[in-house]
Amino acid sequence: MIFPLLLAVFLPAFASAVPRELVARVKESIIPPREWTRQGRAPPHLPIELRIALPQPNFSELERHLYEISDPFHDRYGQHLSQEEVNELVTPHPDSIEQVNEWLASHGLSEEEFSRSPARDWVKVKVPISLAEKMLDTEYHVWAHSDGDTIIRTTTYSLPEHLHEHIELVQPTTLFANLRAMRTTFKFDKEVSTTVAANAPPINVPTASGGHVNASCNFTVTVTCLQELYNAVGYVPSATIGNQIGITAYLEQYANIQDLQSFFAEQRPDAVGSNFTFISINGGLNNQTLDEAGAEANLDTQFAFGLTHPIPPTFFSTGGRPPFIPDDGTPTDTNEPYLDWLDFILNHPNPPQTISTSYADDEQTVPKSFAQRACNGFAQLGARGVSLTFSSGDGGVGDGDSDPATQTCFSNDGRNVTRFAPLFPPSCPFVTAVGGTIFIPETAVPFSGGGFSNVFPRPAYQDQAVSGFLGKLPKGTYAGLFNPNGRGIPDVAALADLFRIFLSGEPILIGGTSAAAPTFASFVSLLNDARFKAIFRVSASLTPCFTPSAKISLQVSTTSRLAIIQDAATKGWDAVTGLGTPNFGKLKDIVTGKSTIKIGT
């Protein structure tokens, strides 16, 4: 019995003598998200492009810059950083770069075989899955979603222990995102609505342009309705001062130009003949067959570009939906398309100052490491003066599914307990999450997404407003169902239903927070235009600036049912409409320095 005892004593010593480069430790491990089913092993010869994120040791300094230049009451407001200055602030430590280089070289990969981001904080390398499995000590499988989509992923991967401090994440590995558009329903326009409204008197709205809004806006929302309601009638933006607005699209959503011209002819005759700049990312298309027109893409582009004309518009279409059909051989891409867009826009020398996105994932299906790193990327854009708006979702506190019959509110941690399900990227504190309202006077629309992040803590700029909301809730309200210390969603709101657009040659009414996000983004773009004219600078990231000026720049909705719970949309911030809807006239005075109102007044 002496030998086993000696073996037990000496084995640790042998283990400690193993070179640290060979000691692998789990970097990330997840429980497969619901609705994903593992199929067979991924073909070993299949190429996969690994993206390796190195730490950004000076990110806190970039965050400080972002908050200062986003606060309209700070001396540095609007003094955004250059792309080069931002890259310098997120550049990894030289040791991290060296260690990652050595690790890649140990697997036979020379510097000629991989690429780096300009800041050197991301490395991309394309390798066969067999090599990726060796590098990450893992196995890749084909996974099928209940909706038919298939991807290649793993649920756990490891790295040499000494690399854990030099690598934040490697993807695609554990990211089972199911990016989807935030759209509720659409229906064909009913002309009876116009007839009913024709004889109705204007609706009194003290904050609106002229103090009233046309009664027809309660039946059909148009560009004119939004200009009246949000106090922007008569404002004429410029086409030549450098300000731009952008709309993103994924999942083969095409913005049809013929439909856009029909929309312009009806609602913005002065814009007829104008068009947007189309930018393809990773093979993204914008097919122009009327039958292929996308409701989401048409809604976003028609209202965003109609509200802001003649500000130069851009439509980004990102390809790369990652299917894998085993009997069709090798797929063209195994990456999440969202990564491709973020990589492209971070490296763009002159991105639009305002970009609206109406797509999101369930936050709990996005690995924390990826969510945090993507959110840091949004902060980098904000520091450069780019405002990002995202739809807050169409499922209330549910999982983003707009159909109550299939909507779920369960945790994805293996316990499957009831818990509210916020969306990402709206949960990132460096973007503006936009909820929805309906009717005039406005009330929160029933499907407006909201709640509290389970990944991101509440930012300082939300403390006063969100704490006030939570303090008004009866003690124990929804205890255990949400994270009261998380970032509150949404930030703001806008009308989100009964929008009249053209789709495949026909007028329809459409709704969703995907209508609210481009609407709010449009007024942000108009604010940038006003600031350009007055001070020759854009307004930087808008999100942190809303809280100090909430009492003077936003009008707040009344009450609504928030999906499966009843929640009060109160004065101040609430988890349905945020701080409320915009008053362009007052916001314009703030961002151009004309307002003398101080914080808290």
Image (cartoon, rainbow, N blue to C red):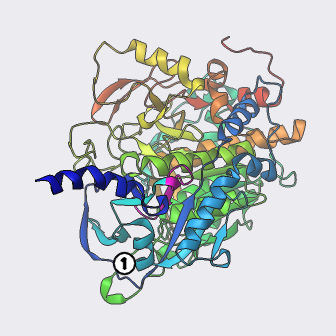
Residue type pointed to by label 1: Phe
Q: In which quarter of the image is residue 445?
A: top left
Q: What residue is shown at x 67% (from left), y 66% (from top)?
A: 116
**144 left or right of 236 in image:** left
Q: What residue is shown at x 25% (from left), y 59% (from top)?
A: 35
- Above-or-below relation of 66 to 458: below
Q: Position of residue 374 (x, y in %)?
A: 55, 51
Q: Which residues, given as a range, are shown in magenta?
A: 162-174
Between 496 and 57, the one lying in front of the other is 57
Asked if residue 169 is among those painted magenta in the image, a careful observer would answer yes
Q: Main SS type for the magenta part?
A: loop
Q: Position of residue 105 (x, y in %)?
A: 59, 73
- Above-or-below relation of 360 to 396: below
Q: Position of residue 123 (x, y in %)?
A: 61, 65
Residue at the farthest front position: 2
- Kindly state the secondary structure of the residue where label 1 is placed: loop
